[in-house]
Amino acid sequence: MKSFPIGARLTAWYFGILAVVLSLFSLTAYFAMRNSIYRTVDDELRARMEGVRRLIDRTARYEPEDLRRELREHSELAGNTLLQVADQQGNWLYRSPSTDRYEIPKLRGTSAVPSTLALNNVPLRVLSAEIQVGDQSYFAQAAVPLDDFYSALHLFATLLLVSVPILLLSAAAGGYWISRRALAPVDQITQTARSISVHNLSSRLIVPQTGDELQRLSETLNSMLERLEAAFKKIIQFTADASHELRTPVAVMRTRTELSLRKPRSAEEYREALAQVHSELEKTSELVEQLMLLARADYGVEALQLSTEDLRQIVRDVCGQGKALSEAKEIEFQDQMSRQPVWVKADAHALWRLFLILIHNAIKYTPKGGRVAVVVRQENGFAIGEVRDTGIGIAPEDLPNVFERFYRADKARSRESGGVGLGLSIGRWIAEAHGGTIEVGSSLGGGSIFTLRLPLIDGEPPELKSAN
Ligand code: ADP
């Protein structure tokens, strides 16, 4: 059943339920009609019998001839109800003219409920009664032929037997047609979806403006396609950028080695060439390492080793490097650490790396004579790490993109200083993997502030408390 199309399955269910309902309805209607006929006939028989009882009671003291006449008159008024009355000795006092046809047996023993007999192939409903008047007892029987009623019942049953299957078949055909019509857009969606591949990811499904589930399904699929397309474009862009960035150092190394090998050189010249190749190799391996990290992060396998850390300690370690670098560039370097420990759940190495990126950038993009400040503090239940500089700043149009992969606001300057535009995207991943955020505020020529916000462990962390 599962392999059948939905339309056929719906129709089969619909057909099955309707068949059960209609059969129950037909059976109920048939038996209700049959019962109602019996009830009407039985009431009629009882009324007749009561009439005969009263009549005999009234005329029993007359001559039998008078009784017979009275019974005949009574019987003639009784329509198609048959009547036969016998005296105590079993002699018929009166029999309706057509009783002979049925030869109703003298059923001794009476009951308040009439019974049904089939006499000469004609069904009869018969009520028998003993009527006692003084010391005389009479035996009376009233009967109604049921053949007319039975043929009406039969006609009704035939009507049901013919009309119910016709009704069922037409309802099932109608149901199938409606379900096919309702599901036709699903076929259309399937066909369009099947035709979409990586080559035409920009195609979209036609959205039926019906305001129903199908419209919602198409819209949901379209927004999924949009996300897929964006992710796919990002991957393509990432691969293209990565290859591009790798090509430059490889080309430099190749040219340098080819030039060196063209003719014999002095040891000094070889050393110089090797030093240049080594420098390019360092950049390349840094790039490859960054690419690997991002790929592993995307794939979800770059796991953090979280432990309770004092953010001040991690930042202090990076500041050591920062100071040395800024001194070489004649930049003032300040650090302002909170007096209390700033406890966070963190991977110390990853956070160290994040601050190294921010401090390196601050020094890289701040000219001689400028200032770089690193601040660690607590604020509203968050651990805050800030790296500020008085450097070149970032233009408003570049601000939203600086955390994107391979994005460089000033391409020439950035490459010159060895950056490929991956540092901040790695930084953002680290911040988010810690359940935190990283934001930038900057203006062109007005310096920049990068702010990391991490959830703070309130008070003294439990593991340190127990160690005390
Ligand atoms: P890069 O390796 O090029 O520095 P990043 O991802 O670290 O790459 O930074 C992306 C871009 O953001 C940089 O190319 C630079 O243009 C801009 N940027 C980052 N930090 C700063 C800063 N402190 N001052 C000015 N511009 C910055």
Image (tube, rainbow, N blue to C red):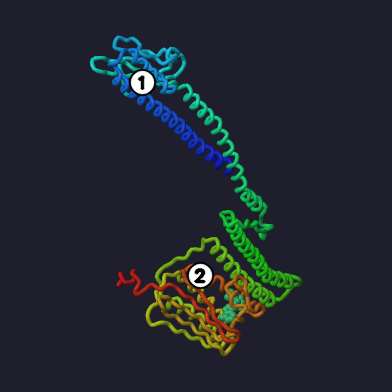
Mark 1 Cα shell of 10 Å, populated few (<14), some (14-19), many (≥20)? many
Of pointers 2 and 1, the one earlier in the residue sequence: 1
> Compared with residue 6, is residue 320 higher up or lower down, i.e. above or below?
below
Measured Cα–Cα span from mark 2 to mark 1? 100 Å
Query: Where does the N terminus fall, quadrant-wise?
Result: top right
Rendering quadrant holding ligand 1: bottom right
Residue 61 at x, y percent in the picture: 27, 16
Q: Nearer the viewer, residue 370 or 164?
A: 164
Q: Nearer the viewer, residue 122 or 75?
A: 75
Residue 293 at x, y percent in the picture: 55, 66
The residue wearing badge 1 is 127
Mark 2 Cα shell of 10 Å, populated few (<14), some (14-19), many (≥20)? many
> Compared with residue 218, is residue 248 higher up or lower down, i.e. above or below?
below
> Compared with residue 330, is residue 309 higher up or lower down, i.e. above or below?
above
Residue depicted at x 41% and y 12%: 103
Toward the bottom, the furthest residue is 369
Q: What's the residue type where badge 1 is placed?
A: Leu
- Badge number at residue 430: 2
Question: Is any part of residue 364 visible from this angle?
Answer: no
Q: Is mark 2 within 8 Å of ligand 1?
A: no
Q: Is mark 1 within 8 Å of ligand 1?
A: no
Q: What's the residue type where badge 2 is placed?
A: Ile
Q: With 112 as the anchor, is 410 left or right in this view?
A: right
Q: Nearer the viewer, residue 192 or 162?
A: 162
Toward the left, the furthest residue is 135
Query: Where does the C terminus fall, quadrant-wise?
Result: bottom left
Residue 284 at x, y percent in the picture: 62, 70
At mark 2, the secondary structure is helix
Residue 131 at x, y percent in the picture: 29, 18
